[in-house]
Amino acid sequence: MFSVKFDLVKKSNLFEKTINNILKYIKGEMSRDLQIVKDSKTIEMASGKLDEGLSSHNVELTIKKIIPINISTIDDRGEIDRLLNEIKNFCTQAEKIESYRYKGLIERFEDENKIK
């Protein structure tokens, strides 16, 4: 599970288009079902299930990255492109982390021998 949250301090059509592009990216290219919560100041997108695989013993790992956006540059296409690329990269890396599967010693040894 991961989420992306936008704090909307200043209304900007370009910023709202960027949010929609990120939404399409997560839904489309990452094939994620999203839950979206909106109010006048915040939009939050979350994917995944909170109770997936819960047992009597669990470990929850959280990575939080805050990307500051200067309000005076919120309509700057270069700044928005940088933001969009950073968010897409972060989501891609989060997906890799989330889909990680532990390989036992024998399985790793077999994989190394296939490469040689």
Image (spheres, rainbow, N blue to C red):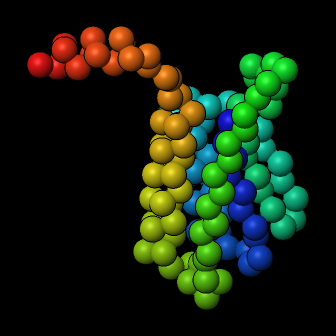
Quick check: 90 left or right of 66?
A: left
Marker count (numbered): 0
In the image, farthest residue toward the bottom: 72
Taking 46 as reference, is 29 left or right?
left
Instruction: Where is residue 116? Give x, y as percent.
Output: 11, 19
Left or right: residue 108 compared with residue 42? left
Q: Which residue lies at the image location 48% right of the left edge and 60% below the top edge?
A: 86
Furthest residue in direction right, as rendered: 39
Q: Nearer the viewer, residue 87 or 23?
A: 87
Residue with the most extreme left position? 116
Viewer-proximal residue among 101 and 112: 112
Residue 71 showing in the rendered view: yes
Residue 42 image point, x, y percent:
81, 62
Residue at x-position 84% and y-position 20%: 56
14 or 81, which is in the foreground? 81
Q: In which quarter of the image is residue 73?
A: bottom right
**Which of the 4 image quarters holds residue 71?**
bottom right
Above or below 57: residue 22 = below
Residue 51, given in percent of the width and then of the height, sits at 82, 25
Residue name at image x 67 percent, y 73 percent: 12
